[in-house]
């Protein structure tokens, strides 16, 4: 089913194009509503729109994504087009999201954290089925460090290894210079000998 955004809704929306902008807006939206950061693990987002006045949000990705939440033990499928109304601690009127319950895929229409907080998140499906899970089961893992720096205890070792490499390089350079100088002396000696023999022959 194609998600059609009416012109009047689009006119009121903040629209973000491209995966990087869409991922950032999705992250901020989940953070602002108090929902776990990994709740919408979409990929290759084409467009993300958000109407602040109503909380309506839509997300379009290149293809559907099937994700397994290991801590919750649940498979969740996100269609190429997903929409919802975002409120504090809740996504309601969800479209495009299904969860696997035993051997059946059920369509979710609401996801909410308990209020007051209990550390639980409840998923409600069309038909009255609901399940609760720990909130942290839907948190995104922290990104790995981009350029991990060596530990404080490792800096001395690194410096020592660098110093050894420099010493080896210096020794090799000195040996090469000695070899060149030796060959030059040998060549000069032969040249002098040839000149002497030439002079002797003339005499």
Image (cartoon, rainbow, N blue to C red):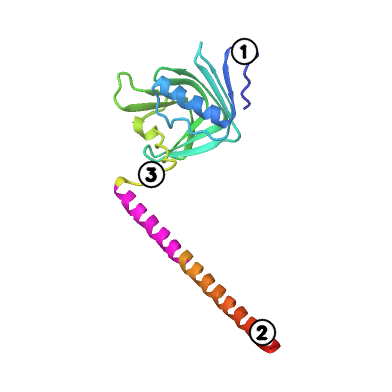
* Mark identifier at residue 199: 2
Q: Quadrant of the C terminus?
A: bottom right
Residue 127 visible within the image:
no
Mark 1 and mark 3: span between their CA atoms?
47 Å
State the mark number for residue 149. 3
For mark 2, give the secondary structure. helix
Q: Residue furthest right?
A: 202
Q: Is residue 164 magenta?
A: yes
Q: Earlier in the sequence, mark 2 or mark 3?
A: 3
Q: Is residue 1 left or right of residue 70?
A: right
Please give left or right for residue 80 compared with residue 106 in the image.
Answer: right
The residue drawn where x is 62% and y is 13% is 11
| Residue positioned 47% across, 69% down in the render | 175
- Closest to the camera, between mark 1 and mark 2, is 2
Of the two numbered discs 1 and 3 in the rendering, the one whose residue sits closer to the viewer: 3
**Overall secondary structure of the magenta section:** helix
Residue for badge 1? 11
Residue stretch in magenta: 153-172
């Amino acid at each position: 089913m194609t998600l059609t955004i009416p012109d009047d809704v689009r006119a009121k929306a903040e629209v973000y194009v491209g995966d990087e902008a869409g991922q950032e807006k999705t992250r901020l939206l989940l953070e602002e509503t108090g929902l776990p950061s990994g709740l919408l693990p979409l990929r290759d987002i084409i467009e993300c729109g958000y109407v602040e006045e109503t909380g309506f949000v839509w997300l379009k990705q290149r293809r559907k994504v099937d994700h397994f939440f290991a801590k919750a033990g649940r498979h969740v499928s996100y269609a190429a087009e997903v929409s919802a109304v975002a409120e504090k601690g809740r996504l309601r009127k969800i479209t495009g999201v299904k969860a696997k319950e035993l051997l059946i895929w059920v369509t979710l229409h609401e996801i909410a954290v308990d209020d007051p907080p209990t550390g639980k998140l409840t998923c409600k499906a069309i038909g009255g089925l609901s399940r609760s899970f720990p909130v942290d089961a839907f948190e995104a893992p922290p990104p790995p460090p981009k350029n991990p720096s060596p530990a404080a205890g490792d800096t001395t070792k690194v410096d020592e290894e660098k110093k050894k490499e420099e010493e080896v390089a210096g020794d090799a350079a000195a040996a090469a210079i000695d070899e060149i100088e030796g060959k030059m002396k040998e060549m000069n000696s032969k040249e002098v000998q040839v000149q002497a023999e030439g002079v002797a022959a003339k005499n």
